[in-house]
Amino acid sequence: MRIMSKNNERAKRAKFALSNYGASNKLERREALVDLLTDLMHYCDKEDLFFDLCVSSAGNHYIAENPTGDQAKGLMR
């Protein structure tokens, strides 16, 4: 139960970040997510970070945070 609680909090933080991109419905949330990811790519370029390595690491964190695999919708298979 604690894992779900932490994951719910993580999802709330992401929703808050997307709200700054004007996302209110499902289509707008998808577009806002794409805009945010694109902006993060530009940020990584500016800060000399490797976006693809960050995404790979995030995927590993996501899997570790979902030990039952119930919520693995966020990863393409």
Image (cartoon, rainbow, N blue to C red):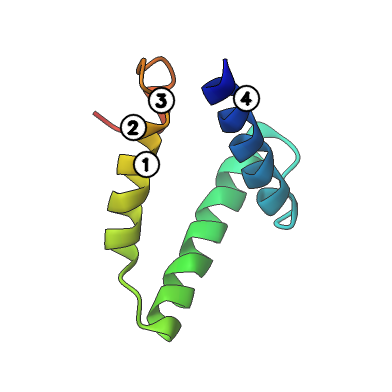
Q: Position of residue 8 (x, y in %)?
A: 63, 29
Name the N-terminal-most of marks 4 and 3. Answer: 4
Q: Are marks 1 and 2 in contact (CB under 8 Å)?
A: yes
Q: Which residue is mark 4?
A: 5
Q: Position of residue 16 (x, y in %)?
A: 72, 47
Q: Position of residue 59 (x, y in %)?
A: 33, 42
Q: Which residue is mark 3?
A: 66
Determine which quarter of the picture holds residue 1. top right
Task: Say which amino acid is labelled 4.
Answer: Ser
Task: Say which amino acid is labelled 3.
Answer: Asn
Q: Which residue is found at the position 42% from the left and 69% from the top?
A: 41
Res 61 label: 1
Determine which quarter of the picture holds residue 27. top right
Task: Say which amino acid is labelled 2.
Answer: Ile
Q: Nearer the viewer, residue 14 or 18?
A: 14
Q: Is residue 9 above or below residue 54?
A: above
Q: Secondary structure at mark 2?
A: helix
Is 21 on the left or on the right of 75, as rendered?
right
Is 36 on the left or on the right of 68, as rendered?
right
| C-alpha distance separating marks 3 and 2 | 5 Å
Q: Position of residue 68 (x, y in %)?
A: 36, 15
